[in-house]
Image: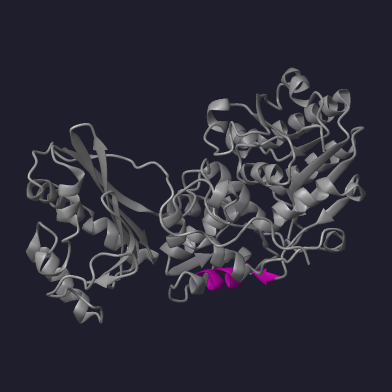
């Protein structure tokens, strides 16, 4: 395809993953956003084949230049956050503007991702009714429209999935409205991207509407159970309460989760409807292996691999799993992550500092707060862990070796040491020490990341955070003193993404059947 493709909603959840998938297929992409500053947060911004363009679907005059010369346009916009309670009116206006501007520009196709739902005990929610209305407005224009109607999308960053994550993680007992027994046919974001790209490549999908969904038809309470099992949590007790309205449950969701109320309320109101496919023609036109709910959730919960990779791109600049968090996603994406990071400048050679760090563990201990470390080791032994040893790790701190309650993940002298905690705790912890030479001195950095598991993990990490801060500041100062150099006071900082030690599993679009 020589002509570019316009992607509206390029800063959003689906658009942020569709753009790199199109680039991976050799498609030129024109990415539309109201704010180029927000667009620049996406890792593909500025890459060859991407043309960022400023525009607003509510301002028809701004669309002519964006659509000029485009072969097709992906319509991935909704106005729940930007327009609040008047989102339905804004969506109508945006759809009319896009349909008219696309026809004037000679665009050959519009591809629209809408919502899947069927009336159950009453009318559709305002959000779902608006999604269907947008489809009708686009189809009434002169440009052929391909409509994909999707149920709940599974993957880190999806607002529906993040609501599921935080509810199950933070509430061992849940009182829910009757919608917990509504049927859904959740689809993995990998499969959604596969269908969007596939529809662009197959002309026979033009002017047609398709239901897309995964292989499982299950109620939401079953989805809660699967998530808890995959997250290593105890089974959640779910108590359906008939007096809870969708609006009340939306306010409760807003209190329990960091998902904004402007998103939580429309989504919660839509949960009263069943969302299952009424036909499956798309599976014959675009065959791909559909991930089950369990597979999609498992891939989304590879949090340790996500932390270890800690980069916006996969190996050799390729695609990360679409179910992983992506750079530029909403702040609530990926679940709770407790991080402590300190740095200080040491007037000493990197080799001297590294010589101190390489003595970590065993009788040398952890340079500061020795009684606290011994206490933690005793607690770990009582809980069935290895605790602390009296000897240093055999063979040194090479990658893969174990000592005390740590496993060495990365050993790059004299620059970086990355450790995974194997102590008994309600979550997973990483400890990283870095050295960067800066002229006649070095910057020594300590980064601790804790991924809590359930409410117990959240309480554990939050309550111990003041203790961990004191311990890590003391460690940095003690390492600096032992290296023989004067040091500045430790200061907090926020690390930037960079590649770490493990490669992610192969990803991209699901394999074609």
104 or 313: which is nearer to us? Answer: 313
Residue 225 horizontal/vertical position (percent): 54, 73
Residue 303 horizontal/vertical position (percent): 45, 60
Task: Tell me which corner region of the image, top left, top right, bottom left or bottom right, holds residue 437.
Answer: top left
Image quadrant holding the N terminus, namely top right
Q: Is residue 70 left or right of residue 249?
A: right
Residue 448 higher or lower than 349, as above or below: below
Residue 482 horizontal/vertical position (percent): 8, 50
Task: Tell me which corner region of the image, top left, top right, bottom left or bottom right, holds residue 513.
Answer: bottom right
Residue 435 higher or lower than 237, as above or below: above
Asked if residue 151 shows in the view, the reply is no
Q: Residue at x 8, y 63 (%)?
A: 370
Residue furthest to the top: 61
Q: How many marks can you see?
A: 0
167 or 25: which is nearer to us? Answer: 25
Q: Residue at x 14, y 65 (%)?
A: 373
Q: For the magenta stretch, what is the residue range?
A: 217-227
Q: Residue at x 10, y 64 (%)?
A: 364
Q: Is residue 261 left or right of residue 293?
A: left
Q: Is residue 326 left or right of residue 350?
A: right
Q: Is 78 inside the magenta-drawn segment?
A: no
Q: Residue at x 19, y 39 (%)?
A: 344
Main SS type for the magenta part?
helix
Asked if residue 230 shows in the view, the reply is yes
Colour logic: one colour
Residue 129 horizontal/vertical position (percent): 75, 46
243 or 322: which is nearer to us? Answer: 322
Residue 505 higher or lower than 70, as above or below: below
């Amino acid at each position: 395809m020589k002509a570019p493709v316009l992607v509206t909603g390029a800063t959003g959840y689906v658009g942020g993953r569709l753009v790199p998938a199109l680039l991976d297929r050799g498609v030129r992409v024109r990415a539309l956003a109201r704010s180029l500053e927000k667009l620049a947060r996406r890792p593909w911004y500025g890459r060859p084949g991407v043309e960022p363009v400023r525009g607003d679907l509510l301002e028809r005059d701004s669309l002519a230049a964006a659509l000029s010369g485009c072969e097709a346009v992906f319509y991935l916009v909704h106005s729940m956050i930007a327009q609040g309670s008047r989102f339905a009116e804004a969506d109508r206006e945006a759809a009319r503007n896009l349909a008219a501007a696309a026809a004037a520009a000679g665009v050959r196709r519009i591809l629209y991702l809408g919502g899947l739902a069927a009336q159950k005990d009453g009318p559709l929610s305002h959000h779902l009714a608006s999604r269907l209305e947008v489809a009708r407005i686009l189809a009434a224009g002169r440009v052929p429209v391909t409509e994909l109607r999707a149920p709940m999308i599974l993957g880190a960053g999806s607002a529906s999935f993040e609501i599921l994550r935080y509810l199950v993680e933070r509430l061992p007992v849940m009182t829910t409205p009757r919608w917990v027994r509504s049927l859904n046919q959740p689809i993995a974001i990998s499969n959604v991207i596969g269908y969007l790209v596939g529809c662009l490549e197959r002309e026979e999908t033009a002017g047609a509407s398709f239901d897309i969904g995964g292989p499982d038809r299950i109620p939401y309470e079953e989805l809660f159970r699967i998530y808890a099992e995959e997250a290593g949590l105890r089974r959640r007790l779910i108590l359906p309460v008939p007096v809870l309205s969708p609006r009340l449950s939306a306010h409760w969701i807003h209190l329990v989760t960091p998902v904004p109320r402007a998103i939580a309320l429309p989504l919660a109101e839509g949960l009263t409807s069943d969302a299952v496919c009424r036909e499956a023609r798309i599976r014959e036109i675009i065959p791909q292996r559909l991930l089950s709910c369990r597979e999609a959730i498992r891939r989304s919960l590879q949090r340790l691999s996500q932390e270890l990779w800690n980069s916006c791109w996969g190996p050799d600049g390729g695609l990360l799993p679409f179910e992983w968090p992506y750079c530029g996603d909403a702040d609530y994406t990926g679940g709770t992550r407790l991080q402590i990071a300190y740095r200080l400048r040491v007037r000493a050679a990197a080799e001297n500092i590294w010589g101190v760090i390489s003595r970590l563990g065993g009788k040398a201990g952890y340079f500061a707060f020795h009684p606290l470390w011994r206490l933690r080791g005793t607690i770990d032994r009582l809980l069935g862990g290895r605790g602390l040893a009296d000897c240093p790790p055999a063979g040194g701190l090479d990658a893969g070796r174990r000592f005390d309650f740590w496993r060495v993940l990365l050993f790059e002298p004299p620059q970086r040491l990355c450790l995974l905690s194997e102590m008994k705790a309600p979550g997973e912890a990483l400890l990283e020490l870095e050295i960067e030479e800066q002229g006649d001195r070095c910057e020594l950095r300590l980064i601790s990341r804790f991924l809590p598991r359930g409410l117990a993990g959240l309480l554990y990490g939050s309550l111990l955070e003041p203790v961990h801060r004191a311990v890590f500041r003391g460690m940095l100062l003690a390492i600096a003193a032992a290296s023989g150099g004067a040091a500045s006071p430790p200061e907090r900082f926020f690390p930037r993404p960079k590649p770490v030690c493990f490669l992610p599993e192969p990803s991209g679009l699901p394999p074609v059947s």
